[in-house]
Image: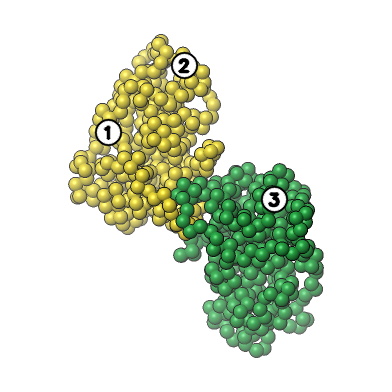
Chain colours: A yellow, B green
Amino acid sequence: MKMENKEQEIKAPTIIAPPSGGRGVHVFAPATVANVVCGFDVLGFAVNEPGDEVIMRLTNKPGITISKITGDDGRLPLDPAKNTVSVSVQHYLQSVGRTDVGLDIELHKKMPIGSGLGSSSASTVAGLYAIKTLLGDDADPAKLLPFAMKGEEMACGHGHADNVAPALLGGFVLIRSYDPLDVIRLPHPAGLYCAIVFPDVDVPTREARQIIRQKINMKDAVTQWGNIAGLVSGLFMQDIDLIGRSMKDILVEPVRSMLIPDFYKMREIAMGMGAVSFGISGSGPSVFAFTKDEETAKLITQKLQQHLTSIKIGSNIYVSTINDAGPKVLG
Amino acid sequence: MKMENKEQEIKAPTIIAPPSGGRGVHVFAPATVANVVCGFDVLGFAVNEPGDEVIMRLTNKPGITISKITGDDGRLPLDPAKNTVSVSVQHYLQSVGRTDVGLDIELHKKMPIGSGLGSSSASTVAGLYAIKTLLGDDADPAKLLPFAMKGEEMACGHGHADNVAPALLGGFVLIRSYDPLDVIRLPHPAGLYCAIVFPDVDVPTREARQIIRQKINMKDAVTQWGNIAGLVSGLFMQDIDLIGRSMKDILVEPVRSMLIPDFYKMREIAMGMGAVSFGISGSGPSVFAFTKDEETAKLITQKLQQHLTSIKIGSNIYVSTINDAGPKVLG
């Protein structure tokens, strides 16, 4: 466990713009919180901060190059056959019959890798939205989902949609079914704030998945689907209290929380300060709380960061409303 | 398996009215479909037909008597200590401190017992609504739920709410949690019709519960909660197609359907005739289909009844919209 506060380093402004004269586009795609506590593998939502950025330029030579990656501490491959952004863009180009296109990609990571905030999804969605924009493809962004899932399969060994779907569509998204793929965008109350804390410890997604029990009690499953039905109802009814009391997870959290430093202490702090709910973001180690106002969200992130510092763990903190737009063109 | 069509017998009009001069009330409470396919133990809805009726009269002598039960083929006890209606009414009287009240109850069963249509719940709710009305108790009917659950505990050995809650509140009801009890009324599309077929075979609720597996695969549970989240979304979005494609049950139906004659054949018939969905009502043996119009619902029930007749099984059939009112005073 490293003692380091990465927020400054990652959030430092990177001045990036397509070179004048060349056709290029600069796209942001949001971080996402998968599972939303009681919706393991089927629910996720997007936030406005953090997120990743991709700059994509058309070139004269068919094929994809990755000229630059920043903010990744050298962890991501520049080889276009191994990078999730280029691989998913390549799938898209094949699908629309445009393998003649030449592209150069810059990827600017603005959030930590391995944080449980859908880092690879944000990059992949930014890349796909960039190529869609460059080619003037005005199809529904939801059509990009299968390509984004190809990227997830490469990044996590599992073609899940609970990060890529909300990153692409914005808001809360339910993946009702994978076969056939059935994705439903859910509403949410306007005044919902999200406090996110990333404790800088290593929780690889694959391992976080492997420790989950494969056999569970029917009784516990019934409790869980009562809660997800309550959460979905609360989102439609704009009932933040119902959302809060539905966000309980008796199946996955008890196991995954073991990989997160002082998880239950952090929950106690957050709930004591007025959080509506508290839980693990995706497979962790990031945790998140919903609040009814921005000030409470800010105070909670500060207090949790202080607590993590006191046990010698660095952290990144974010406060955001729900991102309803998905990816957006910055320039 | 008896070959007998009970519809005529049960639906024959019973002329019942409180004796002139005596203070009495005549109440109807609706049948209910629990589980709604993918919401095992947490979801249910009420229909307008069938339902049970209770006539309750104040008497001069404290205590409860049951003077008459019709439509039960002599299967239900007249002993007020053993009948779910009187037992739940007694719990209510104790709770409001009115054990001084004297009551006589007539119970008129207008639906088959052991049908999986919430027969005991309808009787219990009719009884509770009758005493509430007689005593002029204008509290929210939801306050009667704990007393109705006492009746269920006696009838089924299990204090479930997925029949009594919709019978009492009307419409679709989610029981998010039992401890503490958290019951949420859900909306539904206006043009939703329900076709119900009760094949006259014996499926005791206790046994139907015992055959359900106690340990399940996490993977299957995830599929199930994706579907219940989809069903709840479809109800809020008034999206009948989403409701239909969400109503799949890979955990309970494969086991319980074995107790229902030609279950999969009946599904094939109903879906082939344009049903939106098809499944088991509660623990069976009744089955139900949603349709988008009354005519399709009627044709489906007729066709399924013909099919059951061809394999020498009698049946009752019902077509109804969703009951949004719960119990009602008839006179």
Amino acid bearing label 2? Thr
| B39 sits left or right of A67 in the view | right
Q: State the residue at coordinates (50%, 41%).
A: A175
In the picture, which quadrant includes the N terminus of chain B? bottom right
Task: Chain letter for mark 3, please.
Answer: B
Near-viewer residue (A304 or A263): A263
Between the residue at mark 3 and the residue at mark 1, the CA separation in whole angstroms equals 60 Å
Q: Quickly name the residue at label 1.
A: A10
Residue A210: horizontal and vertical position, in percent? 36, 44
Q: Residues within 10 Å of mark 1 (few under 14, many from 20)?
A: some
In the picture, which quadrant includes the C terminus of chain B? bottom right
Q: Quickly name the residue at label 3.
A: B266
Between the residue at mark 2 and the residue at mark 1, the CA separation in whole angstroms equals 34 Å
The secondary element bearing badge 3 is classed as: helix
Asked whether residue B129 appears in the rendered view, the answer is: no
Q: State the residue at coordinates (73%, 83%).
A: B22
Q: Is circle 2 on the same chain as circle 3?
A: no
Image quarter of residue A68: top left
Between the residue at mark 2 and the residue at mark 3, the CA separation in whole angstroms equals 50 Å
Q: Residue furthest top?
A: A60
Q: Is circle 3 on the same chain as circle 1?
A: no
Amino acid bearing label 3? Met
